[in-house]
Every structure is written in structure tokens, then in C-alpha cells.
Image: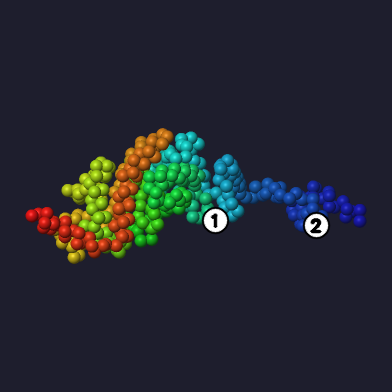
């Protein structure tokens, strides 16, 4: 018995490598062994000199992972359960942002990057619709900050617009802003994201005022009816064919000084360019079916979309204070009567009595002529 006691603590230190290997399988000996078997790996260096190389790679990979984890820990990204950060998170700029109600150069710079095909990609852009997955991509903090600024601006824009047009309801930004994702299901262009931010405002279901912000002096505010439904377009054309009071009001608006100053004269451009409500891509080349090609309103009758737009430069968009909102207000004041008139032309039925009134206007009163 005393001999057996001395074997366990003494022999592992005195035995050679050949004898220690079977001894190490003893349960008492396993308790004395350290948890990490580094002695065995160190003894095997001579027999396998190629093993240190993969170890160095692992250490290097671990160091890289530690650096990535430190970068992630320093970020402001809040990870939910089941989420992880893939790649390095690009943080939003710390400076250059503006108070609510304005648009910063940072926003235009971000949108300018979307023109680059390498950046307009799902791996580069934050996928807002997949936040529940295990992926948070590179630029999410940047877009989040841009989105926050844009919603604050749209809120100020809505307050101004509802003051100008009482028919527009004061909806929150989430109900009027458009998604930045493109619908690529039926398009040959599979670019996933739009190159600008936009919002639209209207009364119940009717086409109204549309605002689109895009770098490169391409920001616009537009108003009108884009590709109205078949019944709406038919009603509008009937008003024009019969020269109803609503149709006469439309002519008066299109020919007004304020309207022509902002959108151009009330006639088609000689080269087919955009001018006033004319020059849209869906405009007919010939007269609509059943309409005389020599009708006095044939130019308007060929239109399938009746809309106007006014463009702003980047310098105007990022102007300090309320300069940009004030400029938008000036254009919205001119657009509002035009939008109201279009709503009447597309919704009010044509009164048959208007034909009789037009005939009287054309022939005149015989007694007065005498």
C-alpha cells in the first residue's frame, strides 16, 4: 500500500516520455494534469514542425476578431437578440447636421453615393426590412441619421403645406414619405435603391403635391395628376371637350403670370421638351379616339398626365434657416389652385347644360346683334 501511494505523485515527474503516456490514463493522474495539454504539444514540436504555422494563423485571426469587436463596441448600433455585426460599421458624420426643418449637405452626400453602382448594393446599404435577421450592414447608422433628418424636414414641410392648402390633412411623416427601395420585380434595372428621398401629399386619394430631393441640382417640387385612371381621364377630357366652367378655370390658371413664371407658357414646346403641363413621356402623338384633331384644346386633350414641376439647386436645398421652406411655400402657393382645379375636373360630372351655354356664347343673342 505505501508503494502504491508513492507511484502517483512521483513517477510522472521521473518517468520518461514512453512510460508516462500509459500512466497518464490513470484516473488519479488525470486529476493532477493541467486542463490545457500544452506540454504534449510542446514535446511534439520536433516530430511535427509544420504545426506552428496554423497556430500563428489562428492567433492572427483572433487578433483581427478582437479588433473588430472593439470597433463594434465603440459603435452606437443597438443589437437585438440574434443579431450580429458583419464587417465594420461606418458611423454617421459627427458634424455638419442641421436643425429640424432643414436639409444638410451630409444628406446630399449620402444620396450622391447611391449613384455609384458599387454603393447602391444590398451589401453596402442597410437593409431596414431585415432588421430581424442576423445581418446589420455597413452604412445603417449613416442612413438612420439621414432618415431622421429627412423626416424632421417633412414634418416642417407638412406644416407649411397644410397652411397653404387647407384640403391637405396634417399627416405624420411616416404616412407621406416613400420607401427608398425600388420595385425591381418587372424592371430590367435591378438597382435596389432609389437615388433620392421623396414624399407626396394629397387629399383623399387624389393626386397632389410631390416633393423629391436628389443631389446634382435635381431636387423638385411637383403637382398634378400622373397617369390618372381611365374614368378620371375620360371625365377630364369631357370637361375640355364641352368647355365647362372648370375647363375655363384651368385655362385661366395655366395662362396666369405667376404660373407661367414658374412653369412656362401654356403651350407645347416646339422641340417636345417639358413646358407647363406638356411634354410628358405618356403624351399622345395623335388626337384621342373620337376627338377632332382640329379641336381648340387638342394639345391638352393629348395629355395623359397633367402635372408641373419646379427644380431647385443644391445650394437652395441646403440654405440656412427657413430659406428653403420659404421658397417651397412660394411655389406651393402657385400650385394649389391648379391641383384644386384638376380635382374638380376628374371628379365632378359634366353638366349637359354647359353645351347649351356654349352654343349661346357662340351664336350670341339675336336681339342684341340687331
The percent position of residue 87, horizontal first and vertical second, equals 52, 47
In the rendered view, how is the structure colored?
Answer: rainbow
Between 122 and 59, the one nearer to me in the picture: 122
The local crowd at label 2, few if under 14, some if 14 to 19, many if 20 or more residues have their Cα within 10 Å, is: few
Would residue 291 be found to the left or right of residue 49 on screen? Answer: left
Badge 2 element = helix
Badge 1 element = loop
Q: Earlier in the sequence, mark 2 or mark 1?
A: 2
Would residue 86 be found to the left or right of residue 325 on screen? Answer: right
Q: Residue at x 40, y 45 (%)?
A: 163
Label 2 to label 1, Cα distance in Å? Answer: 49 Å
Residue 226 is at least partly visible in this image: no
Q: Mark 2 or mark 1, which is nearer to you? A: 1
Q: Which residue is mark 1?
A: 132
Q: Name the residue at the right extreme.
A: 2
The percent position of residue 321, horizontal first and vertical second, equals 42, 34
> Is mark 2 in CB contact (under 8 Å) with mark 1?
no
Between 346 and 249, the one nearer to me in the picture: 249
Q: Residue at x 18, y 58 (%)?
A: 358
Q: Name the residue at the left extreme.
A: 370
Q: Quadrant of residue 343?
A: bottom left
Q: Quadrant of residue 185?
A: bottom left
Q: Which residue is mark 2?
A: 27
Q: How many marks?
A: 2
Q: Residue at x 34, y 44 (%)?
A: 332
The local crowd at label 1, few if under 14, some if 14 to 19, many if 20 or more residues have their Cα within 10 Å, is: few
The percent position of residue 342, horizontal first and vertical second, equals 30, 54
Residue 96 is at least partly visible in this image: yes
Q: Quadrant of residue 106?
A: top left
The percent position of residue 72, horizontal first and vertical second, equals 57, 44
Q: Quadrant of the C terminus?
A: bottom left
Amino acid at each position: 500500500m505505501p508503494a502504491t501511494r508513492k507511484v502517483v505523485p512521483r513517477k510522472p515527474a521521473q518517468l520518461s516520455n514512453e512510460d508516462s503516456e500509459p500512466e497518464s490514463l490513470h484516473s488519479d493522474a488525470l486529476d493532477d494534469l493541467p486542463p490545457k495539454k500544452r506540454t504534449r504539444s510542446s514535446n511534439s514540436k520536433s516530430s511535427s514542425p509544420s504545426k506552428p504555422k496554423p497556430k500563428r494563423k489562428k492567433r492572427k485571426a483572433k487578433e483581427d476578431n478582437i479588433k473588430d469587436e472593439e470597433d463594434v463596441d465603440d459603435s452606437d448600433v443597438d443589437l437585438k437578440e440574434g443579431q450580429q455585426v458583419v464587417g465594420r460599421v461606418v458611423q454617421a458624420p459627427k458634424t455638419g447636421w442641421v436643425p429640424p426643418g432643414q436639409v444638410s449637405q451630409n444628406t446630399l452626400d449620402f444620396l450622391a453615393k447611391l449613384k455609384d453602382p458599387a454603393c447602391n448594393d444590398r451589401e453596402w446599404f442597410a437593409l431596414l426590412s431585415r432588421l430581424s435577421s442576423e445581418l446589420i450592414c455597413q452604412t445603417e447608422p449613416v442612413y438612420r441619421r439621414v432618415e431622421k433628418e429627412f423626416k424632421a424636414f417633412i414634418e416642417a414641410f407638412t406644416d407649411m403645406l397644410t397652411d397653404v392648402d387647407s384640403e391637405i390633412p396634417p399627416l405624420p411623416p411616416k404616412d407621406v414619405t416613400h420607401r427608398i427601395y425600388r420595385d425591381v420585380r418587372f424592371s430590367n434595372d435591378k438597382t435596389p435603391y432609389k437615388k433620392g428621398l421623396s414624399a407626396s401629399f394629397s387629399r383623399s386619394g387624389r393626386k397632389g403635391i410631390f416633393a423629391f430631393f436628389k443631389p446634382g441640382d435635381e431636387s423638385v417640387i411637383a403637382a398634378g395628376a400622373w397617369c390618372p385612371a381611365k374614368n378620371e381621364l375620360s371625365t377630364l377630357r369631357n370637361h375640355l371637350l364641352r368647355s365647362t366652367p372648370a375647363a375655363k378655370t384651368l385655362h385661366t390658371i395655366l395662362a396666369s403670370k405667376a404660373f407661367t413664371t414658374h412653369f412656362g407658357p401654356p403651350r407645347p414646346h416646339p422641340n417636345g421638351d417639358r413646358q407647363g403641363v406638356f411634354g410628358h413621356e405618356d403624351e399622345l402623338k395623335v388626337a384621342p379616339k373620337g376627338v377632332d384633331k382640329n379641336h381648340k384644346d387638342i394639345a391638352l386633350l393629348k395629355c395623359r398626365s397633367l402635372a408641373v414641376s419646379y427644380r431647385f439647386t443644391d445650394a437652395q436645398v441646403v440654405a440656412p434657416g427657413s430659406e428653403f421652406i420659404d421658397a417651397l411655400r412660394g411655389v406651393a402657393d402657385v400650385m394649389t389652385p391648379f391641383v384644386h382645379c384638376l380635382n374638380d375636373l376628374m371628379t365632378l360630372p359634366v353638366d349637359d347644360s354647359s353645351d347649351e351655354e356654349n352654343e349661346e356664347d357662340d351664336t350670341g343673342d339675336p336681339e342684341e346683334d340687331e
